Image: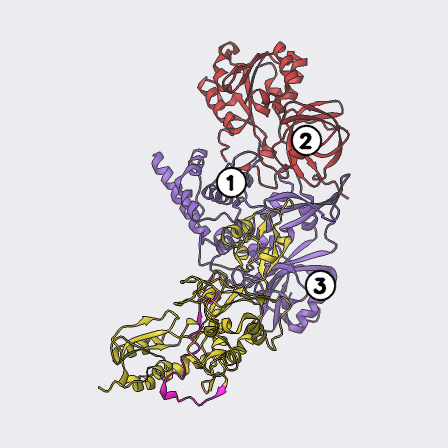
């Protein structure tokens, strides 16, 4: 068999190269980690007909099929058309645009881009007793803003600060947080909230001589544990939804790190408004020459101040919203002084930055 | 406005007597005349309210012996004669004095458990004709915890007394728990004409009760006074309830036939 | 007489009532529930019929109207205690049969039985009348029929919600003038005749068995399940316990309020005196205390039936899914176990 294969083009089509020559792994997107269970019949069909009969749960909540032969890719792409139209359609994605620019999608040709990476979500308040927001809805709204695109971003949505979905470890993590309202007339002074906050949150509650808890509002992480355990409904979640945005978290060979807080108590409009600027920021940072490089690295190249300026451009912050004035990254440097290198090797962003690459 | 049973009345503190470091006796001006063994609800605005047994009474005053153990009682220790405290009551059922009359009376107390029987002891001290004889066993944890020293000395001359400290022996005080001295009471000489009063911490009352039974004392002759958390003293707040019994209304004094089942 | 009112007529009727009465009914508090995007249904003053939630059992019981979680007993200074003022208007309170029957139990604790009338309860009880909300039997945790609390005649008029208004059956003639001219119907309130759940409360035949039951291992299973949060007692229609608490106004530390605050026997410290250890120190002890009160001790004292109306809110509110009829069944089995060992 002729093995002249454009690996990059195949990867862009969401097929990952196998160590077995001529074989690939298909990665299908699952926006927000949820699809109708009936799609699993299609999944079984793909694995049995074109794959090696196995199914892998992707680390970013994709449906993965190993052992797909290069020559079968066209056929598989035709088969997954209904899946893509169904799942992306449900998220409201415009498939005829790439990074916001018109570009006709061929529905029979599979995924148009591998970027942005699948937007993941925990199960959220659709099911979870801890969740503060509907993470699936949020993830779908994000999907619409970041996909399809040749710029890369890893975006994780967690329903509460417990962050089971690791918003702290991706380029742009979104955590659902709750503003907590207190109704002192319903408080019996039992101290349960104080105990659970101490045990499971940020220890912002303490008892007072009046029996009513005192709260350090500033350090409240917005988890809602006090609401969950209050026997009387003295603590309730404010009906308005709020989010914490964590940026720049990543894994990787060079400088893995946990993300840092970018926005706190942001409204959904603010979060989506910022993400709507993502393509513009990426394009500028990479001088309009897309690379397989994740968003966190682009923030590093541009510098946080530039990132902040571009990503919040035109975004009207809600009154509660706090923005990081600066960010002090703390990376794991596998090699000491990893960043200390010749000026010519320094990575830059913006016009001309990609010319030498 | 109609009479409100929960309204505390302002009363002046007349004097304060320091029984020990932790136990002070407050004499408070009032015309209320509780029965021996009843209690009052004492309160200090801002701090709260608590049931305190009457430890002595006289013309125009009541005495309360208070141990500094909590928010409210600690606040009492900041007060001086002339200050105002608030009071409502009396509440509960006191000692069945009429049943004690003409009998040999045995009183066994632990620590401040002496307070609720003090007013009764003082009455008997001035008029012993009411009872055939009086045997008093009073135990204290240690020398520091001894209360009513003056009265203890007085009663020594009038009653058959045994004073004890848990683990030490000093002049006038033997070493050991009160239960150790129950066998020294001349039960046989009483000719079945006696009653026993027991007051103290829960564990002391439990084991004293068992020891009395072992000494052949019938249940009906044993009387105990309970101390429980209370907010209202009128059978509403629920804190003092044990099974179908409300300590505030049905007690605090119980016959052992009832008290033995009052397990929380 | 019974009447049928459309939405507009219902609101007009309501507005007339409001002139004489403060009206309390269950109303929806959106997204205020224990879990995200769930609602609370809670008693509060209502301004229109539209606010009243008919189709779903309230999260918290009706007792909050007459025995609120916090109420001010006195305003104090260092010199005096001044009694708080009572209701200014008569009160109409909307409730289901179980809710209305629960007030009998509340009243048993707070009225003069035992010698003391609670003035704060009394001043509300004197001005309150109940409106019966026909129970739509929307909840599967109820067992009112077993507790004999499915019916009541303690109401001034009964109401059933229709798709575009109300049906009203007036019982107290005093309310007839409000409805003069409204279309007449043959509506009479119906009451639940059966529930999904049923409960047979076991007899505790002797003091000996009662004492053995208190010590029985059956309660220990709750040590690892119950989190002692007290949600069951706050949700309970009949629980009455409270603590008195002095609140200090921070602006003027010499004045404040003495308040009555609901207390829960399930919360650690309920029976604890200063510097002493708790009498009931485990979750199992506390559940035993509550369950035996509801299904034995109360009746043993007052001889008027049990302290439960089968509203099921203790089960609904329990975050650990401890269900009351199951718990009572376990108690029943323990009683049988004690009897068998005694034979």
Q: Chain of mark 2?
A: B
Does residue C200 show up magenta in the picture? Answer: no
Compute the Cα span from label 2 to label 1: 39 Å
Q: Say which element carries label 2.
A: loop
Q: Work out whether B162 lies above or below A199.
A: above
Write down which chain is painted yellow.
A
Q: Tell me the SS state at disc 3.
A: helix
Q: Magenta stretch: give its range.
A: A101-129
Residue C232 visible in this rendered orientation of the protein: no
Position of A275 with respect to C79 (left or right) is left
Query: Label 1 marks which chain's residue?
Result: C
Which residue is the site of mark 2? B77
- Which label lies toward us, 3 or 2? 2
The answer to whether residue A277 is left or right of residue A332 is: right
Q: Colour of chain B?
A: red
- Chain identifier, colour purple: C
Which numbered disc, 3 or 1, marks the residue that appears first in the sequence?
A: 3
Question: In this rendering, do the residues under marks 3 and 2 share a single chain?
Answer: no
SS class, disc 1: helix
Seen in the picture, residue B138 relative to A238 is either above or below; the reply is above
Q: In the figure, is residue A215 to the left or right of A7?
A: right
């Amino acid at each position: 068999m002729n093995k002249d294969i454009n690996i990059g083009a195949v990867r862009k089509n969401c097929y990952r190269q196998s160590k077995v020559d001529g074989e690939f792994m298909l990665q299908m997107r699952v926006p927000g980690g949820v699809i109708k269970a009936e799609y699993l019949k299609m999944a079984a069909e793909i694995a049995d007909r074109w794959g090696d009969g196995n199914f892998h749960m992707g680390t970013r909540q994709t449906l993965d099929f190993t052992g797909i032969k290069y020559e079968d890719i066209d056929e598989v792409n035709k088969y997954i058309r209904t899946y893509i139209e169904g799942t992306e359609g449900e998220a409201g994605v415009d498939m005829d645009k790439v990074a916001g620019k018109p570009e006709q999608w061929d529905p029979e040709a599979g995924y148009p881009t591998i970027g942005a990476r699948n937007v993941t979500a925990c199960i959220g308040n659709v099911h979870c007793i801890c969740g503060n927001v509907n993470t699936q809805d949020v993830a779908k709204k994000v999907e619409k803003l970041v996909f399809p695109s040749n710029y890369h971003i890893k975006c994780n949505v967690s329903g509460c600060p417990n962050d089971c979905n690791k918003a702290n470890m991706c380029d742009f993590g979104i955590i659902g947080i709750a503003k907590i309202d207190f109704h002192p007339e319903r408080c019996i002074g039992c101290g349960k909230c104080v105990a659970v906050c101490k045990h499971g949150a940020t220890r912002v509650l303490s008892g007072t001589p009046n029996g009513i808890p005192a709260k350090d509002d500033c350090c409240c992480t917005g988890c809602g544990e006090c609401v969950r355990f209050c026997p009387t409904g003295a603590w309730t979640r404010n009906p308005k939804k709020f989010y914490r945005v964590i940026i720049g978290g990543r894994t990787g060979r060079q400088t893995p790190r946990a993300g840092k807080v970018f926005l706190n108590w942001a409204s959904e409009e603010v979060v989506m408004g910022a993400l709507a600027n993502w393509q513009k920021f990426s394009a500028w940072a990479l001088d309009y020459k897309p690379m397989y490089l994740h968003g966190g690295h682009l923030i590093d190249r541009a510098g946080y101040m530039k990132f902040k300026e571009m990503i919040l451009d035109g975004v009207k912050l809600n009154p509660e919203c706090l923005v990081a004035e600066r960010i002090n990254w703390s990376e794991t440097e596998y090699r000491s002084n990893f960043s200390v290198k010749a000026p010519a090797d320094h990575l830059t962003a913006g016009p001309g930055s990609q010319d030498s690459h | 406005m109609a009479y409100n049973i929960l309204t505390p009345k302002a009363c002046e503190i007349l004097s304060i007597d320091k029984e020990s470091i932790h136990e002070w006796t407050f004499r408070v001006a009032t015309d209320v005349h509780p029965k021996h063994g009843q209690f009052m609800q004492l309160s200090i605005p801002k701090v709260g309210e608590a049931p305190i047994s009457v430890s002595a009474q006289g013309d125009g005053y009541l005495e309360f012996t208070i141990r500094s153990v909590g928010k409210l009682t600690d606040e009492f220790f900041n007060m001086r004669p002339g200050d105002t405290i608030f009071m409502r009551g009396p509440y509960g059922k006191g000692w069945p004095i009429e049943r004690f009359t003409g009998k040999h009376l045995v009183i066994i107390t632990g620590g401040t458990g002496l307070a609720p029987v003090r007013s009764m002891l003082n009455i008997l001290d001035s008029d012993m004709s009411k009872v055939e004889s009086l045997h008093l066993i009073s135990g204290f944890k240690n020398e520091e915890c001894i209360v009513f020293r003056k009265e203890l000395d007085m009663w020594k001359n009038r009653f058959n007394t045994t004073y004890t400290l848990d683990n030490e022996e000093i002049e006038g005080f033997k070493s050991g728990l009160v239960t150790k001295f129950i066998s020294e009471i001349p039960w046989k000489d009483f000719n079945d004409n006696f009653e026993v009063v027991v007051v103290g911490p829960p564990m002391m009352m439990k084991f004293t009760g068992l020891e009395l039974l072992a000494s052949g004392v019938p249940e009906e002759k044993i009387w105990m006074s309970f101390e429980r958390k209370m907010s209202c003293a009128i059978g509403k707040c629920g804190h003092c309830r044990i099974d179908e019994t409300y300590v505030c209304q049905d007690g605090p004094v119980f016959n052992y036939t009832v008290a033995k089942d009052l397990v929380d | 007489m019974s009447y049928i009112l459309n939405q507009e007529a219902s609101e007009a009727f309501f507005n007339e009532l409001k002139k004489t009465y403060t009206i309390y009914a269950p109303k929806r508090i959106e997204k205020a529930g224990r879990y995200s995007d769930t609602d609370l249904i809670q008693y509060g003053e209502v301004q229109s019929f539209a606010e009243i939630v008919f189709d779903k059992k309230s999260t918290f019981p009706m007792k909050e109207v007459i025995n609120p979680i916090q109420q001010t007993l006195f305003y104090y200074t260092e010199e005096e205690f001044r009694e708080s003022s009572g209701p200014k208007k008569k009160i109409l309170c909307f409730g289901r049969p179980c809710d209305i029957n629960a007030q009998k139990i509340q009243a048993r604790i707070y009225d003069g039985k035992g010698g003391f009338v609670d003035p704060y309860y009394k001043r509300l009880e004197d001005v309150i009348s109940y409106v019966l909300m026909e129970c739509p039997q929307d909840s599967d945790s109820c067992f009112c029929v077993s507790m004999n609390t499915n019916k009541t005649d303690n109401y001034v008029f009964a109401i059933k919600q229709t798709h575009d208004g109300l049906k009203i059956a007036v019982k107290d003639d005093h309310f007839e003038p409000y409805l003069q001219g409204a279309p007449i119907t043959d509506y009479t309130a119906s009451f639940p005749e059966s529930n999904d759940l049923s409960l047979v409360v076991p007899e505790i035949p002797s003091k000996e068995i009662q004492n053995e039951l208190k010590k029985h291992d059956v309660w220990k299973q709750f040590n690892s399940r119950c989190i002692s949060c007290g949600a069951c007692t706050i949700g309970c229609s009949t629980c009455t316990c409270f603590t008195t608490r002095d609140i200090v106004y921070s602006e003027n530390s010499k004045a404040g309020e003495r308040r009555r605050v609901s207390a829960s026997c399930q919360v650690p410290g309920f029976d604890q005196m200063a510097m002493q250890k708790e009498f009931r120190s485990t979750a199992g002890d506390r559940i035993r205390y509550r369950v035996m009160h509801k299904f034995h001790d109360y009746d043993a004292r007052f001889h008027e039936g049990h302290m439960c109306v089968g509203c099921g809110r203790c089960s609904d509110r329990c975050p650990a899914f401890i269900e009351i009829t199951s718990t009572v069944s376990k108690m029943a089995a323990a009683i049988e176990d004690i009897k068998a060992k005694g034979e």
